[in-house]
Image: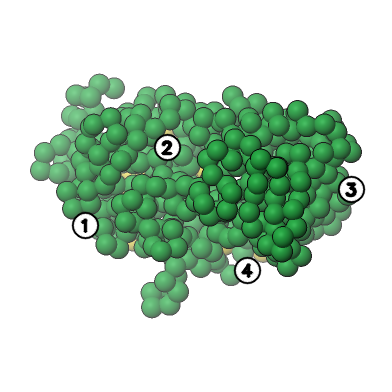
Amino acid sequence: MTLTRRAALGASLAALAAPSLGRAQGAARLLVIGGGFGGATAARFARLSYPELQVTLVEPLARFITCPYGNLLLGGYRQIGDITHSYDGLRAAGIRVVQDWAEGIDAAGKRVRLRGGETLGYDKLILSPGIAIRWGGLPGYDEAASQVFPHAWIPGDGSQTQLLRRQLEAMPDGGVVGLSIPANPFRCPPGPYERISMIAAYLKRHKPRSKILALDAKDAFSKQGLFQDGWKALYGEMVEWVPANKDGKVARVDPAERVFETEFGVRHKVAVGNVIPPQSAARLVLDSGLAATTGWAEIDPATFAVRSAPDIHIVGDAINGAPMPKSGYIANSTAKQAVASAVAALRGTPAPDAVYFNTCYSHVGEEYGISIVGIFRPGAPGGNPGFVEVPNSGGVSPRGDLPEQRRLEAIYADTWYASITKDMFG
Amino acid sequence: MRQAIGGLGLLGMVWAAPAWAAGPAPLAAQGCVGCHGPNGMGVAQGARLAGREAAEIEALMRAFRANERPGTIMNRIARGYTDEEIVAISRHFAAIR
């Protein structure tokens, strides 16, 4: 569809609709920053559900590599191309995709400055910029150290995950693979433990005398019983997980010596080290003054609007959405509520009632999947100011010797990946 | 919920396009499309919901919710939704052709 035709269509639809979404001149402008699970979802959902909107997506990378299923690269079950997505489908849907960095937000003037020099005005802004690594949050871990101990936690161009994979391939049989796992909150709560599983799957096939030493800053983790059952069943004694209360917290790393040093001074030498570092909301959120002192953005749980700047909505891993996890499914689910709320505000109508949905599948081994389900709602007015999980709903897969349940959940995990990426990118 | 569905339904009628016959889904139904395909059209092992009888979808959801039907994951999911939401979800997908 040409711009002219779309504009004409938008105008005619706006004329039909009451109350109108239209600005004084032209269609209302929805600007989305960040083309991941939150941003791509927001842009496509907005474009398809509210065709009268003019939707622009700003994303610095030409292609999106998903965090979900990145661990399967380490296991050898996927290649990078399998988890790489183009923005062409969004362009074809009529979204303007601008490949650039958003550098600054002028909330009062309702515009965003891009690194390339362009300034984009908006009527409503949806921010979904993801996370930043808190360099310096773990002593010894800086950008140079990430070339020795990859984090592989922000996919970017895929180089971090591929570096970790190459290191595993180059490691001699019998080596120790160390993981440093952070305190809450962080992106993808079950992710480190799926990663342990997928590394174990690779080692079992290719380097069976090797060990995994997982040093954790926590005493408990997501789907813990299910993961530990699976590790035992599939990998025997290969995985050693050390909680914080057993001196599992890594206090500093020494990339030159390939050492993880714990709080109590134990120095663990590793052949390959994966540091999942402490995190915050992405730089844009911090630099724009939209993050609380925690490093995460606080938003209205019914609309995802920022209280001090109600035309800005923030979704995805950059927000404090507890007890919701920082997951792709939550970003997808909440992005739609943010868009619907932004449109409602433009129309002067109340935001729709909210219910947020999450399922996080994890692959423990080939044909061995587990899951956690959560359904969440905004807290009651005057009560909990954040999000609440619906009582007696959701939860984790049943424990026990249930091979058919595990097999089906591995298949459903693949289905989830196919379905949600189609919902995001068309 | 009723107000939101009514509003979106009205807009759906005004802006109806073939693939979006029911207009923007009630947000509760948006939770389904992460596994059952955009518009509930079905993907891989995610069963198609679009075009099925509303009564059938509703009965399945209620059976999962009451643990009267074995499920791998749907029984855990269905327990998160109210009667009103189950009706809205069922009607939404039934209306997509």
Q: Residue at x 76, y 39 (%)?
A: A271
Q: Amino acid at mark 3?
A: Gly
Have a look at marks 4 and 1 and say if they share a chain. yes
Q: Amino acid at mark 1?
A: Gly
Q: In the rendered view of the protein, which quadrant contains the N terminus of chain A?
A: top left
Cα–Cα span, label 3 and label 4: 34 Å
Foreground residue, A45 or A281?
A: A281
Q: Amino acid at mark 2?
A: Gly
Q: Amino acid at mark 4?
A: Asn
Query: Is A110 positioned to the left or the right of A407 in the image?
Result: left
According to the picture, the residue beneath numbered tag 1 turns out to be: A348
Q: Residue at x 49, y 56 (%)?
A: A356
- Given this view, does label 3 or label 1 mark the residue nearer the observer? 3
Have a look at marks 4 and 2 and say if they share a chain. yes
Have a look at marks 3 and 1 and say if they share a chain. yes
- Comes first in the chain, label 4 or label 2: 2
Q: Which one of the lettered chains is coloured green?
A: A
Q: Chain of mark 3?
A: A
Q: Residues within 10 Å of mark 3 (few under 14, many from 20)?
A: few
Have a look at marks 2 and 3 and say if they share a chain. yes
Residue A236 image label: 3
